[in-house]
């Protein structure tokens, strides 16, 4: 008998077909009508062609006691979650370093809710990821827990499931990226928030409870679009990267994962000479530091996280000659580059994740220090800013510091791991200037008696500027290097090569 005629093979093919988009036409068309993609369409873009090995494809919702079994096979395909192993970015990093695991919640199945077998599949793939050191990408769209699994008769609340602890326990062990489009509530939002990195589309609503739970708790009646809209979750730092749609989010997930897969093949870089004029001659003028980052990095390789959250410090990833590294930088166009409480928390968390996942860090420093004052203290400055010192002290990966201009006070120390002696190499551009506090503040505090002794306001201002200039001469980059407070002063056009050699000397790559 030909294998094409064997009844068991025919039955298997028919059964598997019920889980696919071609069979689930109504569910597919409903997604497309909203401008969304199916779960399997996202899988197809995310993974390398021919590499996906699926787990638990034949699962259905635990509702056989209340629904027709054959109907369940199509309408609750996979119990609302697609899991498996694959490779991602194999052409860029090689098949061995491209190994990964994926979890894709399927909103077309019972609104992506989490049922009995759904959780078992999620736990299984997380356990495999831990055993095999596989990075994980999870699509989190869904409505949280599911109350309708009537086949499960041996539990009360079902709160003894390991899924959330299993997923959270992977923190620092393997990279975890969460991607969301559409509604993401309750348990799904908890999974999203536990990820190392989060990507969400403009059509995302993310909240720790959905409308039914909020109303049931007596907290009012809300439309799902009232809960955690993207403009709120991006602004408060819940979302690291904003994507236009699912296709864009998937491309971003692939790019973000690449920084944790080792060197990539093929790179180019912009001419470096423009860096010599990147910092204005007038030290009071701001400049776009992202342009500096993008020039130093391999072309097109810089990816920023939390762009509108904690704006005083920029965090992100880049490649240098194909090698991945993390970058933190002060943005002098925001608060003059001062590190406020939100930026300190943002930078500290970023450093902790990068250290846990083994990514070296480049710090591009230009800060007058920490943001101070009564308003800052009301925001918990002492705790937040100290956290940045803790994160820097705990770093086990190499840190290289390049001072673009200002390196003042505790804030500058915190940007360089807690001390200018902490980086494996600390160099400054010729525009660098250093001091225990900002020059103007130091003059006001240190020369108050001399300034108060001058009655004429114009003469007092002239003396003030004279004293500032004197302190600038004392604290300029070449003097800091001469006193060995930093390791070198470099031509800005040499920054790429200096950073590469510094990390190579630390055996970072």
Image (cartoon, rainbow, N blue to C red):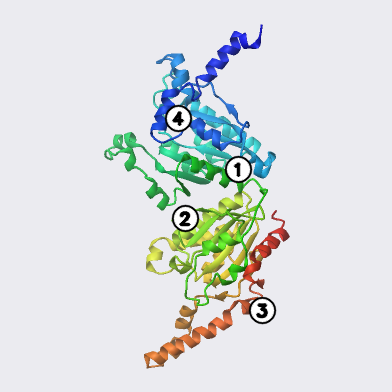
- What residue did someone put label 3 on? 482
- Mark 2 and mark 3 in contact? Answer it, CB < 8 Å: no
Q: Position of residue 201 (x, y in %)?
A: 44, 43
**Dot placed on the residue nearer the N-terminal end, 2 or 3:** 2
Mark 3, Cα crowd under 10 Å, few <14 / some 14-19 / many 20+, is few
Position of 279 compared to 186: left or right?
right
Q: Nearer the viewer, mark 1 or mark 2?
A: 2
- What residue did someone put label 1 on? 174
In space, the residues marked 1 and 2 are separated at their CA atoms by 24 Å
Viewer-proximal residue among 78 and 446: 78
Quarter location, residue 397? bottom right
- What residue did someone put label 2 on? 307
- Mark 4 and mark 2 in contact? Answer it, CB < 8 Å: no
Residue at left 48%, top 21%?
23
In space, the residues marked 4 and 3 are separated at their CA atoms by 63 Å
Judge whether 18 appears above or below 134 on screen: above
Position of 399 compared to 466: left or right?
right
In space, the residues marked 1 and 4 are separated at their CA atoms by 23 Å
Residue at left 55%, top 66%?
365
Q: Nearer the viewer, mark 2 or mark 3?
A: 2
Q: SS of the residue at dot 4?
A: loop
**Dot placed on the residue nearer the N-terminal end, 1 or 4:** 4
- Mark 3 and mark 1 in contact? Answer it, CB < 8 Å: no
- What residue did someone put label 4 on? 114
Q: Position of residue 259 (x, y in %)?
A: 61, 49
Mark 2, Cα crowd under 10 Å, few <14 / some 14-19 / many 20+, is many
**Dot placed on the residue nearer the N-terminal end, 1 or 2:** 1
In space, the residues marked 4 and 2 are separated at their CA atoms by 32 Å
């Amino acid at each position: 008998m030909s294998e094409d005629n064997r009844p068991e093979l025919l039955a298997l093919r028919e059964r598997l077909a019920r889980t696919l988009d071609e069979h689930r036409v109504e569910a597919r068309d409903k997604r497309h009508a909203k401008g969304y993609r199916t779960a399997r369409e996202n899988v197809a873009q995310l993974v390398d062609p021919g590499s996906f090995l699926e787990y638990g494809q034949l699962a259905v919702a635990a509702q056989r006691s209340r629904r027709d079994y054959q109907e369940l096979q199509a309408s609750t395909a996979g119990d609302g979650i697609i899991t498996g192993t694959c490779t991602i970015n194999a052409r860029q990093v090689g098949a061995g370093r491209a190994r990964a695991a994926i979890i894709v919640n399927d909103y077309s199945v019972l609104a992506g809710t989490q049922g009995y077998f759904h959780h078992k599949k999620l736990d299984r793939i997380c356990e495999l990821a831990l055993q095999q050191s596989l990075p994980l990408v999870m699509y989190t769209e869904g409505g949280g827990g599911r109350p309708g699994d009537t086949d499960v008769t041996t539990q009360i609340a079902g709160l003894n499931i390991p899924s959330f602890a299993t997923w959270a326990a992977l923190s620092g062990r393997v990279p975890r990226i969460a991607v969301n489009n559409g509604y993401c509530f309750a348990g799904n939002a908890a999974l999203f928030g536990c990820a190392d990195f989060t990507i969400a589309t403009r059509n995302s609503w993310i909240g720790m409870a959905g409308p039914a739970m909020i109303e049931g708790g007596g907290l009012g009646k809300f439309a799902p679009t009232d809960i955690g809209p993207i403009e709120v979750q991006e602004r408060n730092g819940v979302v690291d990267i904003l994507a236009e749609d699912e296709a864009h989010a998937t491309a971003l997930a692939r790019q973000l994962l690449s920084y944790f897969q080792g060197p990539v093949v093929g790179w180019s870089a912009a001419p470096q000479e423009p860096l010599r004029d990147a910092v204005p001659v007038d030290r009071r003028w701001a400049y776009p530091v992202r342009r500096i980052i993008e020039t130093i990095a391999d072309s097109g390789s810089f990816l920023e996280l939390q762009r509108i959250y904690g704006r005083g410090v920029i965090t992100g990833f880049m490649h240098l000659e194909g090698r991945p590294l993390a970058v933190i930088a002060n943005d002098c166009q925001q608060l003059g580059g001062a590190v406020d409480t939100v930026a300190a928390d943002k930078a500290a968390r970023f450093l902790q994740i990068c250290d846990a996942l083994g990514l070296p860090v480049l710090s591009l420093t230009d800060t007058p220090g920490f943001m101070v004052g009564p308003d800052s203290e009301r925001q918990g400055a002492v705790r937040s800013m100290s956290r940045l010192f803790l994160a820097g002290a705990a770093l086990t990966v190499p840190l290289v510091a390049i001072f673009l201009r200002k390196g003042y006070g505790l804030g500058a120390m915190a940007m360089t791991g807690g001390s200018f002696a902490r980086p494996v190499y600390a160099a400054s551009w010729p525009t660098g200037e250093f001091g225990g506090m900002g020059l103007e503040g130091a003059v006001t505090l240190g020369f108050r008696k001399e300034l108060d002794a001058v009655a004429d306001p114009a003469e007092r201002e002239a003396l003030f500027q004279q004293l500032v200039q004197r302190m600038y001469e004392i604290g300029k980059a070449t003097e800091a290097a001469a006193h060995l407070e930093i390791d070198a002063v470099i031509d800005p056009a040499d920054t790429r090569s200096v950073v590469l050699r510094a990390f190579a000397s630390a055996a970072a790559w």
